[in-house]
Amino acid sequence: MNGIAYAGDAPSYSAPHADKNFSVIVAKERCVLSHPNGKTEFGTGEVAVVPPLVSFALAGRATLICLEQAILPFKEIRIIRDDGERGIAYAAKQAETYFGLGDPTRGGVLPALGGLVAAYLVAFAGDKKLSPVVAAVRGEIKKNISDSTFSLEDSIKLLPLNYDYVRKLFKKEMGVTPHEYLVDCRMGLARELITSGVGNRYSNYSVGQIAEACGFAEPLYFSRVFKKYFGMSPSEASRAWTVSEAIKK
């Protein structure tokens, strides 16, 4: 689920292209997407999402990410604006690096990055596409990402709706369960803190301190969740991602 079948440059296509996977196109310049319903323009800071089996032709420089077995709510081509931190672009760049390296972590990072890209796409698509209850749950998750005392289950149960209904609705609209989304957000923050470089105030912090920043009271539990998510320990990830950043430079 949310695996990455391809990550790399998307040069201008000279012929219509269709894929069984979701195509995520991160623009590096002004691009034009030709498709059965016409033409769509998008540029730097924007991302085009093309559903499976929809033919298209791209003119312009961009990064292409093909997500296989992705659970996304988009039924037609959608242009999404990246956030101010360029989260989608950064995740796509990481995916391109690991895909080019053959993912030296034995498949641990690429699926995680695929899930992160998918979560970003849904999150940045705009609350107007989300029901009020799902938007409220997502807001609580984001607000409490660093709070180790936060109980997602209790937060949902406070809503005047059936717990299972809220959970199913959240998964339908966001592509993941509330708990999976919380883990995605916290692991995304952990990855950001580890790879942020010496200029970041967390760069010299211990695993325990990063765990606390990501909402985990126990460093050991944080490390277990991290390894299950990324396929390697925080220390192994730090070394692998440092090598990745060095190669890109």
Image (cartoon, rainbow, N blue to C red):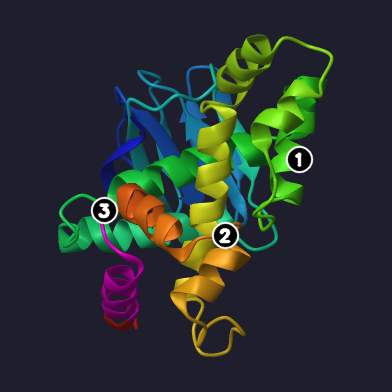
The disc label shown at residue 231, or none: 3
> Which image quadrant is residue 97 in?
bottom left
Magenta segment, principal secondary structure? helix
Q: Which quarter of the picture shows residue 54?
A: top left
Amino acid at dot 3: Gly
Q: Helix, strand or loop at disc 1? A: helix
Horizontal relation, residue 229 to residue 51: left or right: left
Task: State the residue at coordinates (16%, 62%).
Answer: 104
Indicate left or right for 207 with 83 as reference: left
As rendered, which of 142 and 67 lies closer to the eye?
142
* Label pair 3/1, CB-CB below 8 angstroms: no
Q: Position of residue 154 (x, y in %)?
A: 72, 30
Vertical side of 1 occupied by 14: above or below: below
> Marks 3 and 1, how far apart in space?
28 Å
Where are the magenta residues, as a range?
Answer: 232-245
Q: Which SS class for mark 3?
A: loop
Point out the frontmost of discs 1 and 2: 2
**Pointer 2: what residue?**
217
State the residue in front, 88 or 42.
88
The x, y position of residue 193, in whole percent, is: 52, 72
- Could you tell me how far apart the alpha carbons at marks 1 and 2 are, in whole angstroms? 19 Å
Query: Residue 61, percent across and down?
Result: 43, 56
Please state which amino acid type lies under the numbered disc 2: Ala
Q: Position of residue 45 (x, y in %)?
A: 62, 56
Residue on which disc 1 sits: 140
